[in-house]
Amino acid sequence: MAEIIVSVAGKVLNKLTTLASDEVSLASGVKNDVKQLVGSLNTIKVVLLDAEEKKNHNLKLRVWLEKLKEVCYDAEDVLDEVEVENLRKQVVNCQSITKKVCHFCSSSNPVVFRFTLGHKIKEINKRLAKITVDKNDFNLTEKIDSNHVIDWDRETHSFIRDSNVIGRDKDKEMIIESLLQLSYAHENVSVISIVGIGGLGKTTLAKWVYDDKFVSDHFSLRMWVCVSDEFSLKKLLIDIINSATGQKYNQMSLDQLQSELRDIISHERYLLVLDDVWNEVHGLWLELKCLLNECVSGSKILVTTRSERVASIMDTISTHKLEGLALDQCLSIFVKCAFKEGQEKQHPKLIEIGKEIVKKCGGVPLVVKALGSLLHSSTSEQEWINVRDNEVWKLDQKENMILPTLK
Ligand SMILES: Nc1ncnc2c1ncn2[C@@H]1O[C@H](COP(=O)(O)OP(=O)(O)OP(=O)(O)O)[C@@H](O)[C@H]1O
Ligand SMILES: [Mg+2]
């Protein structure tokens, strides 16, 4: 479990550190709270390795790690909201379309946002402070061993809580079916892709598949790499090897790396997730593919990308085009984000307006989550109506611009 916490806590710590150094977006009180959070996480991070070693013999320690994981997850949710808000701000001064967004996200909402953000961060701080104090009960020692250097920089990680995924069962089933097919054509490794617009849930689905029991039983080696826009052979080899070995190789030459990679995959049927690929240069992909093919037959690469062109240059043998979520699924995501647990029952009128807002989100969970979070803690019917009736929806319907517009 500590590995999961390490990865989640690392991502959270990274984002918090960036946020703490952001001169613009936070009120000074909130900034101090964020700095305090960074301090607590830094104190905890150095004992995580020791906690992992001792957890099997200590139930209380396991519970402590579980609590830490929950707090990190909640912090991650809050940071996602900050990201959406920052994107909104970045575009506010640009084009006419974005002025509408600005208006849409409503002049009153930044206040609601700041208030709820400050409140949520305080809440998380309180819980993390308690966890930091409780750490003293376990006599943990600080350990940073070079064979276990924690990868604090990773952009996406492979862990997902089952209960957080709404719908997508059929998609999951279809992708797993393709992954478990033993061999295609004459290649040892085949590529399967998940394609869809931003925020649709490609990464979420890939994580869910990656974590599935059939999948983990079938592939003796699983690796998760977040590619994003830098498709550099050396960087990818390092990331793949690090994911496979749990270690950190970054001092090797390209030649040592390719030999290490081929050595790692030569005896194993592997699954490699390449998350968020943007590269459209066929030659760059071929260089990597040539090395990745030196493996046991039936290995698979699962790619997530927004672009069908990317999927096609990667010689994908099966492309899964992701559709929007159904209305009821979107509504349950929205309710989760807009209300504290169980409180929706007290607001039937808001739920009715919420249903109409959700209808306009085009099945994109990121949009649903962003709007749900935006309206969180607001019980003003008028604010909800303002979002529902905003002009921007008309524009979206014509141009299918929901996500870019929101961003
Ligand atoms: N099925 C789902 N149930 C609940 N939440 C979801 C679901 N799918 C996606 N989400 C949420 O929506 C947001 C966007 O999802 P995700 O990052 O998977 O999208 P993506 O398609 O990979 O986007 P991008 O193209 O930007 O990488 C995340 O906060 C995620 O938790
Ligand atoms: Mg993604």
Image (cartoon, grey):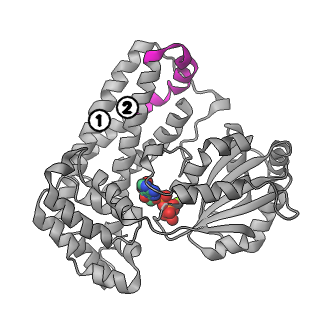
Can I make out residue 335 in this image? yes
- Depicted 53 relative to depicted 10: above or below: above
Residue 241 percent across, percent down from the top left = 73, 45
Q: Under tag 2, what secondary structure?
A: helix
- Image coordinates of residue 216 in percent, x first then y, are 67, 42
Mark 1 is on which residue type?
Asn
* Quarter of the rendering containing residue 322: bottom right
In the rendered image of this protein, does residue 380 appear above or below residue 160?
A: below
Please state which of residues 23 and 220 is positioned toward the viewer in this rendering. Answer: 220
Residue at point 53% right, 42% down?
Answer: 152
Q: In the picture provided, is 44 more to the left or to the right than 342? A: right
| Residue placed under numbered mark 2 in the picture | 40
Q: Position of residue 280 (x, y in %)?
A: 67, 74
Q: Residue at x 74, y 55 (%)?
A: 300
The percent position of residue 301, horizontal first and vertical second, equals 71, 57
Looking at the rendered structure, the kind of residue marked 2 is Ser
Q: Is residue 45 magenta?
A: yes
Please report whichever mark, 1 or 2, sits nearer to the chain's N-terminal start. 2
Measure the alpha-carbon separation of dots 1 and 2: 8 Å
| Label 1, residues with CA under 10 Å away: few <14, some 14-19, many ≥20 | many
Q: Which residue is mark 1?
A: 125
Q: Main secondary structure of the magenta part?
A: helix
Q: What are the residue bounds of the magenta stretch?
A: 41-60
Q: Are marks 1 and 2 in contact (CB under 8 Å)?
A: yes
Residue at x-position 50% and y-position 45%: 160
152 lies above or below 399: above
